[in-house]
Amino acid sequence: MPEFQRFSYDVLVIGAGGAGLRAAIEAGAAGAKVGVVCKSLLGKAHTVMAEGGIAAALANVDDRDNWQVHFADTMRGGQYLNNWRMAELHAKEAPECVRELEAWGALFDRTTDGKILQRNFGGHRYPRLAHVGDRTGLEMIRTLQDHGIHTGMELHMECTVLSLLLDGNRIAGACGYDREKGRFQLWEAKAVVLATGGIGRAFKVTSNSWEYTGDGLALAYRAGAELQDMEFVQFHPTGMVWPISVSGILVTEGVRGEGGVLRNSEGRRFMFDDIPDLYKEQTADSEEEGWRYTQGDKNARRPPELLTRDHVARCINREVKAGRGSPHGGVFLDISWIKERMPKSEEHIKRKLPSMYHQFKQLADLDITKEPMEVGPTTHYMMGGIRVDGDSQMSNVPGLFAAGEAAAGLHGANRLGGNSLSDLVVFGRRAGRFAAEFANANGSVTIDEVELQTTANAALAPFDRGHAGENPYQIQYDLQETMQNLVGIVRVESEMQQALDAIGQLRARAERTGIAGNREYNNGWHTTIDIGNMMIVSQAITRAALLRKESRGAQFREDFPNKDSEWGKYNIVISRSADGEMQVEKRALTPMPNELKKVIEEMK
Amino acid sequence: MATQVTFRIWRGDRAGGAFQDYTTPVEEGMVVLDAIHRIQAQQAPDMAVRWNCKAGKCGSCSAEINGMPSLMCMTRLSAIDLSVPVIVEPMHAFPVIRDLVTDVSWNFQAKKTIKQFKPRPPDAADGTWRIQQADVERVQEFRKCIECFLCQDVCHVLREHNKHDEFIGPRLLVYAAALEMHPLDTEDRVSDLRHKHNIGYCNITTCCRQVCPESITITENAIIPLKERVVDRYFDPLKRLFRIL
């Protein structure tokens, strides 16, 4: 019988990125005994990858900004499928959360009068993103990490979580194993916060790190929690496409913001060919005007390269499919051309885009000040996730909370850049506070020992099959191919049906995985657990995308290319039925209060 | 065009191990981590490798490639002589867990011994601070650190002399410098740097600066100014005289 090391907490936080750390700090401050379980080493979570900044209506650069404008921008970006309460709280609390980070040691770039500087970003009406160069995420996670380690939280680094535990219908903790030795661990807890991030690794081309296998979503789903908005996966238009081994790594929107242009193999700026009616008024009608906008001319309109991420991604896709792509299956993104417009352009590019210069120089042996880059869409962010209460972040499972990318609601059908880092701290803080309250108000839990043993035995089964079993790496690869090719940026019913069949077959194979060696730091073993989670997430994405017969935000259906106002009344909610089958249903949006409707009307 | 390349990878655990050769096809543009992944997926599924972002931003995949402490995800095969086996081994300054993965938990424990950030009271009317960009920029360099611990790995005080109990190493000296030079910080770490963290053990060989993937000027910009603060306080003859008087 497998042995468990046992730990007991008031609040268990799973995940140690921005949301998890912020939740742990808050729960600790509320007096809870806090444990944090994370998949990697502390400080390595995907938050480090964020570049642009953190959106908060501080009004430091433009005093017309306030929470109402930020709220309306977020709702418009999300095509009004957002949880309006979350969008409201987010807009109201983000400034305070940014100031809190500063009080804990974060250093943001400054205005000339010494305030926190804010920059423009797609979809935000005013300059709103507090930032530090192009490494804001690192600044944020390091601040939370260095503050957090002095608050008494107990850390369990490099652990795999196998299952959430229930006591009746209430959460009772989680179990898993530590990677180093492969010893089983039981983390008993009165409340659990899931802050496990996204799902990018279910796709072949992604900007997401290794950890992003949808663990929290799958854990919550299996424990009876509802998932929502799973059809909305954001594809960032510009990821690297060459060399193959680095394809998917993000090329920041900032390149286009600084005047970078997209061209096809014929040298044409194809973004001018397809400007949606909704944006015609706000988009430049000449290359000249677009250039002036990027250089800060307030009377000029933005170039079409800076249209919403979903649209730009689809245009790139269209060019490639029409045979007008670059040699390695992308299009050209050129910033070097600005030498025609300014002296010393090379120094300018290196100063404005240091990490991009470095990234291409080091990984692609390409000097972006001299040559165009090759770019294409990359899986970037999951708008969907665990369905939570807007105020408390609690799911429908009592005591189970979620925050950050793992939770659904704030971003609706499409996320604005910069709204993710603020999401982490605003809702990490709320989840931590309400989880501590829940733990305080509810007594201790009882662990189902039989369940624990069953989970451990199932986790060990691949060792029994050894070399005779299926190779987990191959299954992961095949799943990524399937999702990339059939449920990607342009979706159609027949292909998604094909994907469901393929996922069914992959699931059968995933149940027969075999691994050699022992339990100590065995990457093969970890992969067998990851792919189980990715199967659930992939199935949920595909089922939701099939049901939503329209194109909206990040979801584009070739067979239903238009937005359908009827579909604008529903979220798609996914849950596990008593017999273990995946249930997919339409759920009407909660009516918005009049005062918020008024805010949206006024901002139109 | 795929060519066959041999990687000589250290396999083993705390009890010991040995190099093992794996030959795998490589293509243009690949980095060392790609080759390691391919070997793992096709030939050695249980090989232990730590990695995360694969974009040089998280600092997880630190190892020694042909003897040089490096990030596996940022080392291109085109920069290496592939006509002879490529040697990949775990960092030496930390205990091995298995294969290429080392136990770096000491760094996290040692960090806790450095006094945390302590800001001065807010001085602006709105309850926040005014800070000049120049003051932000002064410490930016230190705050770029991705905690890959390659500088710790190459530091002879840790690597050769195993002074982990007495010396905090370059990474944590950079961390202390970031705090000491933070425009809002009011804490005093100079005494600790001398007595507890033994900054004096560093004899500025600059090895740490040479392996830093973020090109932080560790020795000159972080360690030497901290040493100067220690010297100013404890070894300035005039100040000593004043203290006696």
Image (spheres, coloured by chain):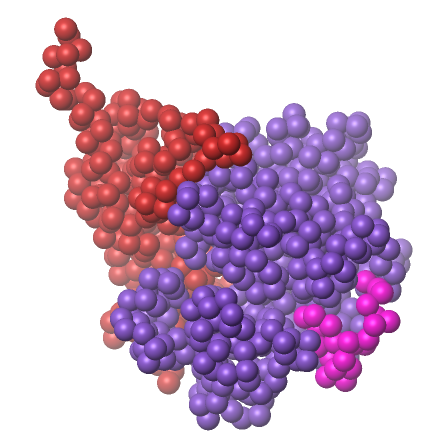
Camera sees residue A519 = no
Q: Does the magenta stretch mainly form a helix, a strand or a loop? A: loop
Q: Is residue A380 above or below residue A418?
A: below
Q: A570 left or right of A282?
A: right
Residue A378 lies in quadrant: bottom right
Q: Is residue A216 highlighted in magenta?
A: no
Q: Who is closer to the viewer here, B65 or A391?
A: A391
Label the red chain with its letter: B
The image quadrant where one finds the C terminus of chain A is: bottom right
Q: Chain A hue?
A: purple
**Residue A29 image offset from top left, x and y in percent:** 61, 28
How many numbered badges does the structure rendering display? 0
Q: Which residues are magenta?
A: A549-571
**Residue B204 image offset from top left, x and y in percent:** 17, 41
Q: Is residue A274 above or below residue A160?
A: below
Residue sitting at x 71%, y 73%? A555
